[in-house]
Image: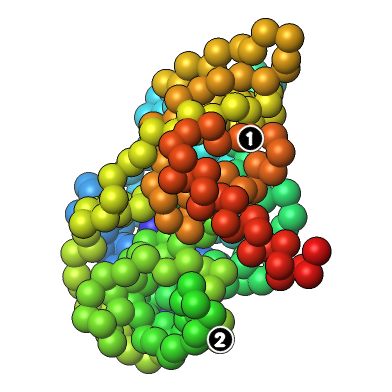
Amino acid sequence: MKSERLLAITMMLLEQEQISAPKLAELFEVSVRTIYRDIESLSQAGIPVVAFPGSKGGIRIMENYKIDQRFFTTSDLISLLTSLNSMHKHMNSKQTAYTIEKLKALVPKKMEKEVALKTDQLIIDLSPWIQNGQAGASIDLIQQALDNQNALSIDYENRAGQYSSRVIEPYRLILKESSWYTQAFCLEKQEFRIFKISRMKNIQQTNHLSDQRTPPPVTFGRDTSGRTAFITLSLEVDYSVKDQLSERFNDLAFIPQKHSDRYLVEFPYFIPDEFGYHLLLGFGTRCKCLAPDTIREELVKRLKEMLDFYEV
């Protein structure tokens, strides 16, 4: 991410007297042009970065400039390291690893054990149980395109399993419930769209530079505008389903059944679409829909179709 890279460049320039733009570009795996844009950003932020031309030239911070260690409190460093460790677990970038090491160097010697202990007290792991190595490679390619402001050519699979070739300008990487997405401007559709990375194949950077557009806010969720609104279901569920529903919807009231390990609950968030029916059927015998009858009948119909499919 750009903010991490800017911090890492600053720390490196404070530690080294001078370093060349090509060396920085190689280290952070971006273009020289991107490094010069970063230097401009640092200058605009008030950090006196200067560039000297020639074979012995390079980039340096003015000698009379220092970052006081009080710039970050111990609590600041713990929060930053916790966040970056989580990000590194998901993205595994050299840049993030380097930033982590630079931040650790700011920790006073007498506070090292305390910071290490508190940083390890909170672990944020949103990765899926089964790892997908291909997803990591795709994320790296998109991250490089973001850094270099390059468009990508991709083959994209829609929900019907049909592929189409696209050229997109990526603007954001998004992690949502263990799934990675990119918000990008689609040159074919001439609008911003959110692409699921697991559906992107044959990802390649192009020579086309992304235009500086302003992406809209990222929104997720099923759009119910123009469609049937939420329907309230009466459900009978066991403890495992109660646990899963409680994680997503914390306002549900579960009523324990006498002489049973099951619960009654009014579920007001059901939408009668493929996602909704897949959710209910996915619980198997751990969840029974008691009402309304229209939803019960549709569930029975789908179960009969499955039995016919397996010729039972």
In which quadrant of the rendered view does residue 145 lie? Answer: bottom left
Q: Nearer the viewer, residue 49 or 211?
A: 211
Residue furthest out toward the top: 258
User: What amino acid type should be assigned to the residue bearing mark 1?
Assistant: Cys
Residue 102 on image: x %, y %: 55, 44
Residue 137 on image: x %, y %: 62, 71
- Residue wearing tag 2: 202
User: What amino acid type should be assigned to the residue bearing mark 2?
Assistant: Asn
- Residue wearing tag 1: 287
Count numbered badges in the picture. Answer: 2
Left or right for 193, reference 122: left
Left or right for 37, reference 238: left
Q: Earlier in the sequence, mark 1 or mark 2?
A: 2
Q: Secondary structure at mark 1?
A: strand
Quarter occupied by the N terminus: bottom left
Q: Are marks 1 and 2 in contact (CB under 8 Å)?
A: no
Q: Secondary structure at mark 2?
A: strand
Q: Nearer the viewer, residue 299 or 60?
A: 299
Q: Nearer the viewer, mark 1 or mark 2?
A: 1
Q: Nearer the viewer, residue 65 or 275?
A: 275
Quarter occupied by the C terminus: bottom right
Picture residue at 43% right of the left edge, 56% below the top: 273
Q: Nearer the viewer, residue 187 or 102?
A: 187
Residue 234, visible in the rendered structure: yes
Residue 158 on image: x %, y %: 46, 76
Residue 20, visible in the rendered structure: no
Q: Residues within 10 Å of mark 2 (few under 14, many from 20)?
A: few
